[in-house]
Structure formats: C-alpha cells, structure tokens
Image (tube, grey):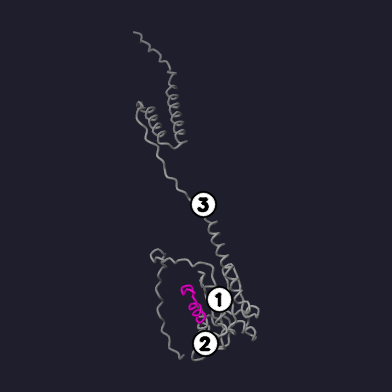
C-alpha cells in the first residue's frame, strides 16, 4: 500500500509584520517620552501617562477626567555676587573718606608740632598713624605728660571722640635700660606711658571700649640705637586709628575639630642634679 504524501508547508512570509509592529510601537513611545521631557507641565505629564497606558495596555483614555491645576513654584531671588561686592566696596569707600577727614583734622590741630618735626601723621589703607616723639610728652624716665602737651593731646581726643574707629596707643623706648622703683625695665615704662595717653583720651570723651594700650619697650625700633638721634627717634608714642571694624568672634567647638592622636609621654630619665 503506497504511503500518502504530506502536503508541503508553505513558509509564512508575514512574520516580519510582528517585528515591524513592535518597532513602530517602541518608536512611538520614544517620541512621546522625548516630547514630554521637552517641557515640564503637570497636565502634559498626565497626557503622557494616559497615552502610554493606552498604547501598551489597550486601556481607553478617560479624556473627561479634569487635569490638575498648574503648580506655581515660588521664585527665590538670589543676590548676584557682583552686586554684593559692589555694596561692600561702597562701604569701604565711605570708611576711607571718613578716615581722610580724620587725618585732615589731626593735621590742623597738630600743625605746629608737625612743622617742628616732633609729630608725624601717616595715612595708609588700614588707617591713620600718629607718631609723637616722647621728648615733648614726657620727661626722661617719667610717665607724666608735660603740661604744655596736655592741651595738644586733648585736641586729638576731640577729633577722635565723635568717630567710631578702634584706637591703639603704643609706647616705645630705646635700648638704654632703666631700673627704678617705679619702672624696673623699659617694659613697664612704655606700658605706663601708653596708658597715660589712654586715660587722657578716655577723660576727654573717647569711648573706653575703643581704646587699647600696649607697651613694646625697645622691641620695635624704627632707627638703629647706635647714635643719640636714632635713640631719640625710637622713644615715641604711636596712636593707631584703625579703619577696619573688628569682626565678632565665633567659639570653636572642641568636638567639631579633629583631635590629634595622643602619644604616650616619654618616661622621665633620672639625672643627677647640678647646681644652678
């Protein structure tokens, strides 16, 4: 008995339609996403969500659903660094003008002593420095103001009293040592002379919180101490009028700062005591 031949299967040439349909669907989804990302809007986001659901899940879009109202975000105004720098520069310029006026007033009240070479007024970017030779302020080895200079120092105090600049008064001596009951060294002499000028300023109306007195002895000479002229130049009282406003300090938290690794202290060595 002859076998029945199987009918030959024809090739399905329409399989490419499935891949093509998938490609078109993905391409459609890609352009929808790109369009949605081009603008940020709550309503368009809802449309995108409904379109994606309709394309991939065959869920009908509910076009009657109301769209949420657009959300308006507050806009924070940030000051530009250039504007802040410009405002800071304006404040500095105003401070410089005030300091220049102070320097002019001091030049007027100290003009006779400036002509004699006993007083120098120096204006810098930081402020004004008044350098006064101590030969016209104090007697040798003493810290009491000469009566003739009390009025001149009071005139300087009258110029400084209405201002708000910090004032530092420095006392300086030459390298010739002093050893008296009142002043055991040049440190005490320079400090008391600076304090004497400070007290006169405070009594003349300058706010005490703006005043500082420092004694440097012979540690900061402006001329060599080899000759008498150099030593006379170094014996001086300097008044610094600072244009910079001191910043408020901030306490440092001990726990916020990294602590150094503690190392054991070396054991003390036993040494024979020697006479000093």
Binning the other alpha carbons within 10 Å of mark 1 as few (below 14), some (14 to 19) or many (20 upward) gives many
Binning the other alpha carbons within 10 Å of mark 2 as few (below 14), some (14 to 19) or many (20 upward) gives some
Mark sitting earlier along the chain (1/3): 3
Residue 217 location, quadrant: bottom right
Instruction: Please check the rendered image and state whether residue 206 is part of the magenta-colored stretch, yes or no.
Output: yes
The residue indicated by pointer 1 is 156
Above-or-below relation of 1 to 129: above
- Frontmost of labels 1 and 3 is 1
Above-or-below relation of 201 to 40: below
Q: Are marks 2 and 1 in contact (CB under 8 Å)?
A: no
In the image, residue 249 lies at what x, y percent?
A: 44, 67
Tell me the SS state at disc 3: loop
- Frontmost of labels 2 and 3 is 3
- What's the distance in space between the residues labelled 2 and 3, CA to CA? 56 Å
Residue 20 is marked as none
Above-or-below relation of 195 to 21: below
Q: Is residue 76 left or right of residue 105?
A: left
Instruction: Using the image as rendered, state which of residue 243 and residue 164 is in the foreground.
Output: 164
The residue indicated by pointer 2 is 185
In the image, residue 121 lies at what x, y percent?
A: 61, 74
Mark sitting earlier along the chain (2/3): 3
């Amino acid at each position: 008995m002859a076998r029945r031949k199987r009918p030959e299967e024809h090739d399905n040439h329409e399989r490419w339609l499935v891949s093509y349909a998938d490609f078109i669907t993905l391409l459609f989804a890609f352009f929808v996403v790109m369009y949605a990302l081009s603008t940020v809007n709550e309503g368009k986001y809802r449309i995108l969500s409904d379109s994606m659901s309709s394309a991939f899940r065959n869920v009908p879009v509910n076009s009657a659903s109301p769209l949420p109202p657009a959300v308006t975000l507050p806009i924070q105004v940030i000051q530009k660094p250039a504007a802040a720098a410009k405002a800071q520069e304006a404040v500095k310029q105003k401070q410089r003008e005030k300091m220049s006026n102070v320097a002019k007033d001091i030049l007027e009240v100290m003009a006779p002593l400036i002509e004699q070479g006993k007083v120098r007024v120096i204006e810098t970017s930081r402020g004004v420095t008044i350098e006064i030779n101590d030969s016209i302020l104090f007697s040798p080895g003493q810290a009491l103001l000469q009566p003739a200079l009390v009025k001149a120092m009071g005139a300087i105090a009258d110029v400084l009293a209405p201002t708000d600049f910090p004032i530092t008064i420095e006392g300086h001596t030459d390298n010739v040592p002093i050893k008296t009951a009142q002043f055991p060294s040049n440190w005490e002499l320079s400090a008391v002379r600076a304090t004497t000028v400070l007290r006169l300023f405070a009594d003349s109306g300058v706010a005490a919180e703006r005043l500082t007195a420092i004694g440097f002895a012979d540690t900061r000479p402006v001329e060599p101490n080899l000759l008498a002229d150099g030593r006379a130049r170094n014996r001086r009282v300097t008044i610094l009028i600072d244009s910079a406003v001191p910043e408020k300090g901030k306490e440092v938290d001990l726990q916020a700062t990294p602590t150094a690794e503690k190392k054991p202290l070396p054991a003390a060595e036993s040494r024979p005591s020697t006479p000093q």
